[in-house]
Image (cartoon, coloured by chain):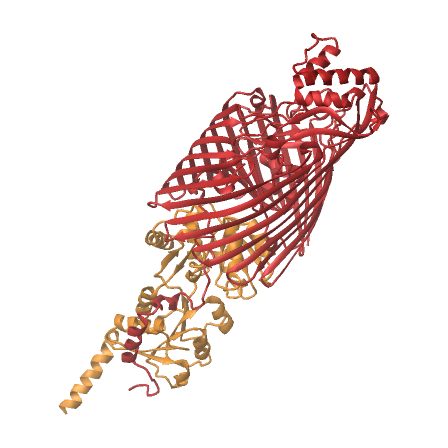
Amino acid sequence: MNALRAAGLAVLLLAGAPAVQALEILVAAQESSPALQRFLVGLQASRPDDRVQFSRAEQLPAVADLPRDLRLILIGPELLDWRQRSVEGPPTLVMQVNRIEGRQILGRRQPLGITLLWGDPPLARQLNLIRLLLPQARHIGVLYSNDSAFLVQELRQVTPAGELEINAHFWPNTRDPRVLGRLLDQSDVLLGLDDPHLYNPHTIKTLLLSSYGRRQALIGPTAAFVHAGSLVSTYSDQQDWLDTLGTLLDRDPATWPHELYPAHFKVMGNTRVALSLGIPMTDPHQLEQALQRLEASP
Amino acid sequence: MPFPGLAKSLPPLLLGLTLCSVGRAHAFELFLGTTELPEILTATRLQQAPAAVPGSITVLDRELIRTSGAREITELLRLVPGMLVIPEGSATTVNYHGGLGAAARRLQVMVDGRSVYRPALAQVDWVDIPVAIEDIERIEVFRGPNTVSYGANALLGVINIITRQPSDSLGTQLSYTTGKRGIEDWYARHGFGWDGGAMRISLSAFDHDRFDMDRRGNDFPDSQRLSRLNLRSTHELDSRHSLDWQLALKSGTNQDKNYEYSNDYPANLQDSRADVDARDYAASLRWNIDLSPTHRVYVQGAVQHWERIQEWRACAPQIYFSPALSQLYGQSPSYVNALIAYASGQGAQPVPATPQQMTLTQQLMQDLSLLGFDAYTCGLLNANSRENRFDLEVQDTLSIGDHLRLISGTSYRHDAVTSETYFDGSRSKNIARVFGHLEWYATSEWLLQGGAMYEHDSMIGESLSPRVAVNYLFHPAHGIRAVYAEAVRSPDMFEESADWRMRVRNLQPAVLGQGSAYLFLSSHAQGGLRQEHIVSRELGYNGHFANLGLHLDVRLFDEDITDLITFWPSLGDPSPTNDDRLSFHGWESDANWQLGQSDRLRLSYAYIEFQATHHYDSELTPRHSGSLSWLREWGRGWNSNLTYLGADSLNENRFERLDLHVTKRFQMGSTGIELSGTWQQRLDDNPLGGRNTNYKQRHVYWLSAGVEL
């Protein structure tokens, strides 16, 4: 009897205090990697009361077989594709998917139970970065392909009217740099969209040498391009993602949005390129704070 | 276990972490993307920020070049502070700060790293440079001595003409220009690319009548007609090696006056003009090697050929072809001049100084008794020359850490000329050069730069040119600089070893039974000249006010050229010497202001004071000179550029001009159409240039139409 009473008490306690209930968190990705393992360690460390487990995609059961009280964190577009095939399933956070991949997999749909945490820098944030670093820039050059055309529309919506002007050029054939040349001739700075068709290891040389040849900076498309020679980009590192995930995991999944960009971010700049272009690259931390202030009061 | 199917849990993960932490993988690679991207803008590829340059650079960018409507490079150079552009006969000369306007020899001019000043005469035939203005990406003008980086002849500055990358000029472009003063140009280009390469081929023609008359109002023949073929190709051999090669051919005719022409002699036996057929050929190959992101080398080789064919008929008294007179003149020009003066009834009869002069004078008297003073003869003269240059250069750029960069290199050059008239045969010289330049960021604010060049010129000797500079970057975009530089200019082959005589052929009537003879006048360089030497001190400021869109450069300069060779090559004049001196001091400024989205203002100004020991060097330099340009985008494809150019005393004349260029662009599908018009209005009536040429009308205009497919 005592044992039964104790068990009943425990059930009551757990039911009455959902906030402190330990969560079962399942992280899934196509492949494991040292970087992913470090992320998992970080996630577990940030949530000591929860149980974090990892599964490779091929070892996952069917979505419908997963417990509904599980929190599913999926890494990469392949996993999004796998998850979106099932209407039913545990609340899911999808990371490491950019806007174009999201659009290709989901179209305009917003499936219930799936929250997309976009991996590419938000365009409004990148624009703010241009306003802070290159206050004289007025004409923002943007290349787009069929895949990224929808992003240009969004970019125009977040562009401060009268202050900046978006010069968007369609670049269907990246082997023909004429479009790029014409765009650069009409622009003060090039803003990269995270479109792998346009920005990839094969095109980046042409893009950077052409823009630098005109003493113009490339902003973005992501922090990965900064080492190659892009001037600057915002990005979110592991801690930023853990903070973002922490906020969501603490909340009732029913209140999770369909999509979001991480509120926590950092700035990565190429000081050598900045120096060469004569652009004062203030301390990245100060830039982060300035960006946060701009986002707080746009 | 809630999910029996899950294979991995935390302990193995921790093991994985231990292993990976010693590798290069970093946690946030997960959030940076996994694609391997090459480092493109490496430390060796990046150029210095404007505020960190050890000197002053004016950049004439493509927008400025296009919207200026300029048809000639020399017209663009008027936008550079302190750059003095004047016409000289059938040519145009460009000097920086001053010197003898008619003979500009102290600037290094390069096209894509290939030096284009003529080997024998050290001058630049601007109109003959085989490059079309449409193919130019930008022109960088380094104001001040820079022999460390560009070799001797960069005594006062360097003009770097950089053509467009073939990959930036794909497709087809056609344009046609016509206007007053016989202006008629066309340009055709086709560029195409492939995986890892691109090629551009352009054909162009340039045609105009230039000036209408000389200072006396007489017709002045100086039309220029030329056509060019340019080919440039780039090849990415692999991720570390690339090739860039060029071919340039130019052929044309530059009209010139027959300066020997005289009204005393029958016009039907003389040419009123002495036109120059000018052909310029060049080929170059550059091999870029990226050894690592911090180490880059290039090897560049070039061959060039300049051919100037100038043949004409002129008349002179037969006695001028007397061998005795020629020999006498060779021994003592002053004796012959006195003798001619005496024969014309001026002065006393000169006394021969030597027995040989006495003998020659007696022979001359015999010739004179046969030929008389008034008998003339007419024959064919020439001032032909053929010059060649071979150039090989290796340059190495090495970045050591984030704060140190070393640029070093070596080059070898062979210059040769063949000209019966100017050299009585051939001359050649070899120039070997080693150079090094170090940039060191002592702190993020203090940048120290220094370098030196050692040059051995087989005709002149050795020289060492050092340069040191300190830049204080009190803000990354604002810097103050102090520069001390020494530089040299080696005398050219004409100055050092001219043997200038006119062999006149096809004499009619024959003189003393000879159908071919030398005109008695001659000039022989004595040789033994030293290099001209400049000591330059500069204080400067360069800043970029990002909020205002304003870029400003101010330069205070003090330049002192010693061992100066000032002479105007004229047949019969004495040999050049190192006897002169020329110094400049003053200040100049270059500002570029982007006002809002549509307007751009560009200002250049120079205030120059000078001291010159030779009056030839006292004429060109204006105290105040400059330009102001207003570029505007009106929207709907309309653009304009309004430019004022002015100098208070350019070659002793006030010069003021207003240029307006208006462009309208349409886009029809993938085809771009451009229509434009240029109006130049002189605000003064002054002639320009050493030979004081002028126009009948103060204005000129031309119209262009172009299509880009």
Q: Say above or below: B287 vs B306.
A: below
Query: The chain drawn red is chain what?
Result: B
The residue at the far left in this view is: A2
Say left or right for B396 vs B90. left
The picture places residue A260, in percent across and down from the top left corner, at: 40, 66
The picture places residue B365, in percent across and down from the top left corner, at: 78, 15
Q: Say above or below: A136 vs B355.
A: below
Q: Quadrant of residue B295?
A: bottom left
The picture places residue B597, in percent across and down from the top left corner, at: 52, 44
User: Where's the C terminus of chain B, which quadrant?
Assistant: bottom right
Q: Say above or below: A173 vs A16.
A: above
B39 or B293, which is in the foreground? B293
The residue at the far front in this view is: B355
A169 or B38, which is in the foreground? B38
Q: Say above or below: B681 vs A99.
A: above
The colour of chain A is: orange
Q: Quadrant of residue B130?
A: top right
Q: Residue at x 49, y 72 (%)?
A: A109
User: Where's the N terminus of chain B, which quadrant?
Assistant: bottom left
A264 or B558, which is in the foreground? B558
Q: Residue at x 60, y 34 (%)?
A: B493
The picture places residue B384, in percent across and down from the top left corner, at: 72, 35
Count of picture labels: 0
